[in-house]
Amino acid sequence: MNVAKSGYRVFSANSSVACTELAKKITERLGVELGKSVVFQESNSETRVDVKESVRGQTIFIIQTIPSRDVNTAIMELLVMAYALKTSCAKNIIGVIPYFPYSKQCKMRKRGSIVCKLLASMLAKAGLTHIITMDLHQKEIQGFFSFPVDNLRASPFLIQYIQEEIPDYRNAIIVAKSPAAAKRAQSYAERLRLGLAVIHGEAQCSESDMADGRHSPPCVRNTTGHTGLELPLMMAKEKPPITVVGDVGGRIAIIVDDIIDDVGDFVAAAEILKERGAYKIYIMATHGLLSADAPRLIDESAIDEVVVTNTVPHEVQKLQCPKIKTVDVSMILAEAIRRIHNGESMAYLFRNIAVDD
C-alpha cells in the first residue's frame, strides 16, 4: 500500500492492459504501489469508477493512455476518475496523459470547432489541476488550459535509439516529410550532427481528383444583384510536384515527426526517398496511433523500421507488423511526477532541447 507520509497516490484511469503496464512501470520507478481502483463499463456502456482507498488531502496522479481505437471511452474514464477523486476530497489531481487526444483539432477549420479547447475545459471542470503530457501536436495548445501544463519531450529517447540501434547512423540524414516538420527535423539533425533533407510538394493527380474546392472561389465575379465591396481575386493554392531538398543518395533516411497515424504520407515519402537513392528508411515518431490498416501498409512498404514510444498502446499493431519497435518513456514520466510532488524544478527534463523540438 502507498504509505500515507508520501503524500501522493498514483492511479490508472484505464482498464486496458497497456495503460496498467505503463502505470506499473512508473510506480516501480517511484517506489510506490499503484492505487486501488476499478474502472469498467456498465452493461449500457456507461463508464463507472470505484476508488477503493482514501485520498483525502492527498496529491493524486492519474495515468491515462489513449488507445487509437477507443479515444472517447478513454476520455470519459479520465473525466469520471478525476471527478470521483475530486468529490473524495483529493487535494490536487494531476493528469499524466502522454498523448493528448484531439490535439490535431486545435485550429478553426471552416465551420468546425476547436475540440482541443473544449476538452481542456472539460478536464478543468472535472477537477484536474495540472497536466503532464508529451510532444503536443502544437505547443500553443498549452494556452487552452487554465492550469499548468508540462509538455515533455521524447526526442532524447529517440535520439538515443538512433545512436545505439541504427548501425552506421553517421551515414544517415534526417528527413522532414513536409516543410511544416522542418523545425523538428532540424533539431534532431543538429543534436546528431547530421544533414537535413526536406520533402516538398505533392503528387500530381488527374482532373477528376481535383473536385475538393481548391480552385474556389470562382475567378468570375457575379455581376447580378448587389455586389458589395470589390474584393481582390483570390488565387488558388497549389503545391508544386514533389521534390527532395537535400541529397539522400547512398544514405540512411530517418523521417521524424510527432504523430504517425494514417501512414499514407509516410509510405509515399519512403518511396520517393528510395527513388532518390536512400538504401534504408526509418520512421521516428513520439505517438504511434497506427490506425486502420497502418500495420499492413508499413509491412508492404519500403520502410525498414517504425520506432514509436509507449505513449499510445500499440501491442496489436506490433503483432501485425514486425517492423514496429517501441521505446519506453516511463523514466521521464516518473521523474516528472517525483519533481512535481517534491516541488523541484522541471528545467532538468528540458536540458539541451530546442524550443522548436
Image: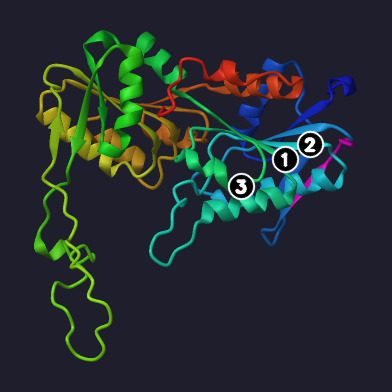
Q: Amino acid at mark 1?
A: Thr
Image coordinates for residue 144, horizontal then vertical, percent: 57, 47
Among the two numbered marks 2 and 1 on one chain, the one whose residue lies closer to the N terminus = 2
Marker count (numbered) = 3
Query: Residue at position x 26%, y 37% from top?
Result: 179
Membership of 50 in magenta stretch: yes
Residue 273, position as x, y percentages in the image: 16, 29
Residue 110 drawn above or below residue 223: above
The disc labelled 3 sits on which kind of residue? Ala
Q: Upstream in the sequence, badge 2 or badge 3?
A: 3
Q: Do labels 3 and 1 touch, CB within 8 Å? A: no
The amino acid on which the numbered mark 2 sits, given as a three-letter code, is Asn
Element at badge 3? helix
According to the image, label 1 marks what residue? 129
On the question of residue 311 being in view, the answer is yes
Quadrant in which the N terminus appears:
top right
Residue 204: percent from left, percent from top: 11, 51
Horizontal arrangement in the rendering, residue 279 relative to residue 22 (left or right): left
Query: What element does badge 2 sit on?
Result: strand
Residue shown at the point (61%, 47%) measured from the top left: 74
Which residue position is annotated with label 3? 74
Residue 310 versus residue 279 in the image, above or below: below
Q: Which residue is mark 2?
A: 92
